[in-house]
């Protein structure tokens, strides 16, 4: 959640600019800073419990949302899994009259949405593992090519290099030191 990212930085308020998401906009074919014709600027406010109370006091929904998220986090800290923590927080909020009407009508959607967020974490971990595996394969391939180049430099016969690396003769001949 965006509010999580802001709270981890210890900031209560932050301004984000879409143009800052790109290290070099011109490399992407976008106009440089002076040529920006439209820039999305978003003010992010941390509404976690205990942060920016003046905003929470003005909005019952935000205050309720903040309490709801706080209850999920508390239950997770107590060792509950995400699904159980969300279900428990929904039940607790309804019992305490927090977002009661909203959770009555949309409780299942809230549960599904928060579980999708959790699944995105799992997806990110899987993508990391895939990237690691791809990197290892690339490293092995580069190592094989390095061995072949060194063997060529030492004048070893192509057949021996083939046996060492598994490369076909054309690949071996294409390598230069």
Image (tube, rainbow, N blue to C red):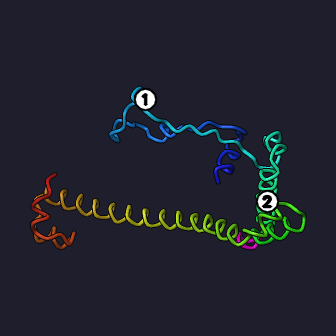
Residue at image mark 2: 68
Mark number, residue 33:
1
- Say left or right for 100 vs 127: right
Neighbour tally class for label 2: few under 14, some 14-19, many 20 plus, Cα within 10 Å: many
Judge whether 26 appears above or below 87 on screen.
above
**What's the magenta region?**
80-84
- Residue at 54% over, 37% down: 17
Sort mark 1 into few (<14), some (14-19) or many (20+) by Cα contacts within 10 Å.
few
- The N terminus is located in which quarter? bottom right
Residue 101, image quadrant: bottom right
Whichever of labels 2 and 1 marks the residue nearer the N terminus, that label is 1
SS assignment at label 1: helix
How far apart are the alpha carbons under marks 2 and 1?
40 Å
- Chief secondary structure of the magenta span? helix
The percent position of residue 116, horizontal first and vertical second, equals: 60, 67
In contact (CB < 8 Å): disc 2 and disc 1: no
Residue 61 image offset from top left, x and y in percent: 78, 53
Relative to residue 50, is residue 31 depicted above or below?
above
**107 or 163: nearer the viewer:** 107
| Residue drawn 41% across the image and 26% down it | 34
Residue 14 place in picture, x, y as percent: 65, 37
């Amino acid at each position: 959640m965006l509010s999580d990212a802001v709270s981890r930085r210890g900031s209560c308020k932050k301004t984000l600019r879409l143009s800052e998401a790109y290290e070099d906009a011109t490399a992407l074919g976008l106009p440089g800073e002076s040529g920006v014709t439209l820039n999305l600027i978003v003010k992010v406010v941390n509404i976690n419990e205990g942060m920016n109370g003046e905003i929470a006091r003005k909005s019952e929904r935000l205050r309720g949302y903040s309490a709801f998220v706080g209850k999920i986090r508390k239950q997770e800290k107590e060792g509950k899994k995400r699904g159980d923590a969300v279900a428990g927080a929904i039940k607790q909020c309804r019992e305490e009259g927090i977002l009661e009407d909203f959770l009555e009508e949309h409780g299942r959607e809230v549960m599904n949405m928060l579980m999708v967020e959790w699944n995105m974490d799992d997806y990110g971990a899987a993508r990391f593992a895939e990237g690691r595996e791809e990197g290892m394969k690339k490293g092995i391939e580069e190592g094989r090519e390095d061995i072949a180049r060194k063997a060529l430099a030492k004048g070893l016969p192509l057949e021996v290099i083939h046996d060492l690396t598994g490369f076909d003769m054309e690949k071996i001949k294409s390598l230069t030191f």
